[in-house]
Image (cartoon, grey):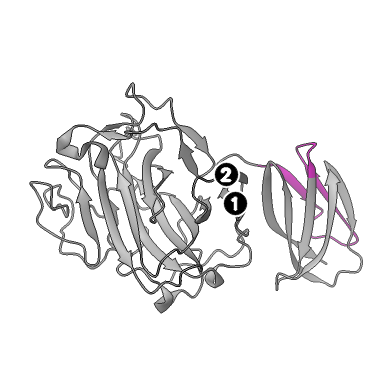
Amino acid sequence: MKKQILLIMLLSFTIVKLTTAQILCVQCFDQNDSIGVGVGTNNFIANGNFENTTCGFNSNSNTFCPNSVNYNCNIANWVCTGGGSSTYTCFYDSTVWFVEQGTHSVYFGNNFCSACPLGDTTCLINNGCTVTGSPAGYPLSNGAAYGDTLGVSLSQAVSGLTPGSVYVLEFWAGGESDGLGSFVNKGLFAVDLGFGNTFLRCKPTGPHTGIGTRFLIQFKATASAHTVKFTNWGHISFSATELILDNVRLYTPNHLPPTISACSSDGVTNISDEPVSVDVYPNPVSNELTVKTSTNESSQIIIYDMLSCKLFEKMFTNTVTLNTETLSKGVYMYEVKNKKGVVKGKVVKN
């Protein structure tokens, strides 16, 4: 069993207003390990690891989308729609790219697409985890043989939800890697929970050792049943990868470890690839702990014990020194945040 990562360094933090407030936040982490703890039978997604399938490996002719001329297999509990006669959604084993869980991960093979009117990617705006800027009608797959504006989708209807309650969709996303270095840039895909597409990025994940992205999407249910739908239109450029999907889970927020930041109720929480520089020293600490940021923004330092009880907090600009004499020996968690980001870690009192 993979070791759960309970202390995760969050690299950046952004709030973006939503057109639909039912999605509370999107968070992403550069890691393969699962985040939700003790989910087990409380997972609303069936066959989220895609192991229950009649599809074989390493052949584009083992395609699970009915619109393809090569359709000859299925994935239990999931429905493939869109795409076209030439769509080649299939499975490859771990000699081709990293497989996050078990032996199967879904490949959304669908040729090339245009994300912008001129067939380039200049309209796309990376906003932490999410991507905006693609105009109406785009992304556009390469002709009817690949689904045009429909792209190719894999979906599952989830029931038993409580309207008004919050749920977490967690999944791992990687990308096609040919081993030749051709695919070095992030691809583009979308998730729809019934509120329209949220566009995200996927990066190449090489065989055996690839590091993908772990996504958390927290949303408020508006009905007792929601459909979870993933869509890919193809490579957005010759060097960008296509979506590889694995380990999809849906559960209640009580399964999230306390080190995961709370969602904003009016926006998207994005953890981006932009680092926020924070120095916390000395570590281990005796009587005084210094916290220094690389920005002159007003910041906040919060110290928690290992039960996530807040011990103290302080506002500061650039640098602050804290008196830690009264702390007992042991391990403590800290959180440093300002409008540019949030960083979490741990400090030892000796």
Q: Position of residue 349 (x, y in %)?
A: 81, 65
Up-down relation of residue 333 to residue 160 (above or below): above
The C terminus, quarter of image: bottom right
Residue 78 drawn at (x, y percent): 25, 62
Q: Nearer the viewer, residue 157 or 71?
A: 157
Q: List the residue tagged with mark 1.
A: 266
User: Residue extending furthest bottom?
Assistant: 41
Magenta-drawn stretch contains 248: no
Q: Is residue 12 visible?
A: no
Dot 2 and dot 1 residues touching (CB under 8 Å): yes
Direction from residue 35 to residue 173 in the image, left or right: left
> How many residues crowd around disc 2 within 10 Å: few (fewer than 14), some, or many (20 or more)?
few
Q: Position of residue 205 (x, y in %)?
A: 38, 46
Q: Nearer the viewer, residue 183 or 17?
A: 17
Report the residue at 75% width, 38% height from top: 294
**Tag shown at residue 17:** 2
Residue type, numbered disc 1: Asp
The quadrant where residue 347 appears: bottom right
Residue 18 against residue 53 in the figure, above or below: above
Q: CA distance from mark 2 to mark 1?
A: 6 Å
Q: Residue at x 74, y 59 (%)?
A: 334
Residues drawn in magenta: 276-298
The residue sitting at 23% across, 41% down in the picture is 110
Question: Label 2 sits on what residue type?
Answer: Lys
